[in-house]
Amino acid sequence: MSLGLTEHRKEDREQRLAEIREALGSRSIVLIGLMGAGKTALGRRLASRLDLPFIDADAEIEEAAGSNISEIFAEHGEAYFRQGERKVIARLLKSGPQVLATGGGAYMNAETRANIKAHGISVWLRAELEVLLKRVNRRDNRPLLAGDDHEAVMKKLMAERYPIYAEADVAVESRDVPHDTIVGAVVDALADKLGCVKKPAKDQSREKV
Ligand code: S3P
């Protein structure tokens, strides 16, 4: 009995995902990028495709603090938040393999960057200003965007952070297309970086039936 082309493609895809998991070992896939880059939404889907746990660092910080990020900023200030962020991410990185989404400022901390390098593979979800603005304007839960001029803030953050984000192991453009398309691009980039070879789907016509 022979498998159809679709089944072969599915088998190859599963095989490649398994290779990625194996190459990862206990490392985490760490998603970095600006607010609105899609770290959480894409991270969840990536984790489900790879059959790995998904962890959101901001949610973990909120749980550890017993309050939400806006409250932490308002009550204790940004420096306090950054300290908590650094500690929580260092703790989380000990529990790989997993997909770990980090808040936009996390990778700017040199110690966190070094920790990610040691315990993970970093994926920068890069996005154009227009895409980011469209996404961040949908919600008002971000203290750095508490003022009116979102565009000015995001432009400033892009100028400061993109050169540092560029140190990530891989970069994938987070465009305004279905999530699954971007997740596919992340999987391809990871497979490439980790040396997992992409095998073509078997050609049915060359097979004996
Ligand atoms: C921040 C991004 C936020 C959150 C905090 C600060 C930043 O996370 O950590 O509001 O400095 O860019 P998201 O990138 O998930 O929105």
Image (cartoon, rainbow, N blue to C red):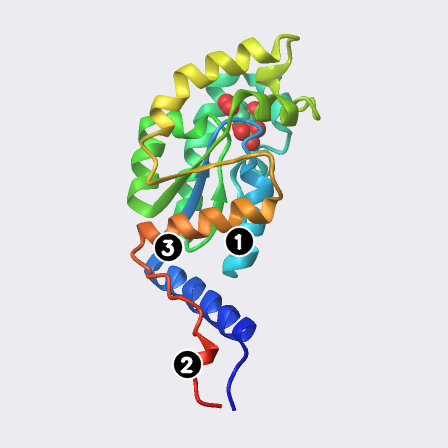
Q: Earlier in the sequence, mark 3 or mark 2?
A: 3
Residue 128 at x, y percent in the picture:
51, 25
Looking at the rendered structure, the kind of residue marked 2 is Arg
> Nearest the camera: 43 or 188?
188
Looking at the rendered structure, the kind of residue marked 3 is Ala
Looking at the rendered structure, the kind of residue marked 1 is Ala
- Mark 3: which secondary structure? helix
- Mark 1: which secondary structure? helix
Q: How many marks?
A: 3
**14 w.r.t. 40: above or below:** below
**127 w.r.t. 182: above or below:** above
Q: Which image quarter: residue 67?
A: top right
Residue sitting at x 52%, y 61%: 51
Asked whether residue 106 appears in the rendered view, the answer is: yes
- Mark 2: which secondary structure? helix
Mark drawn on residue 206: 2
Contact flag, marks 2 and 1 (Cβ < 8 Å): no
In the image, is 202 to the left or to the right of 37? left
Mark drawn on residue 191: 3
Contact flag, marks 3 and 1 (Cβ < 8 Å): no
* Disc 2 crowd, CA 10 A, few/some/many (<14, 14-19, 20+): few
Residue 193 at x, y percent in the picture:
32, 49
* Disc 3 crowd, CA 10 A, few/some/many (<14, 14-19, 20+): some
Q: Between tags 3 and 2, which lies in front?
A: 2
**75 w.r.t. 166: above or below:** above
Disc 3: residue Cβ within 8 A of ligand 1's nearest atom: no
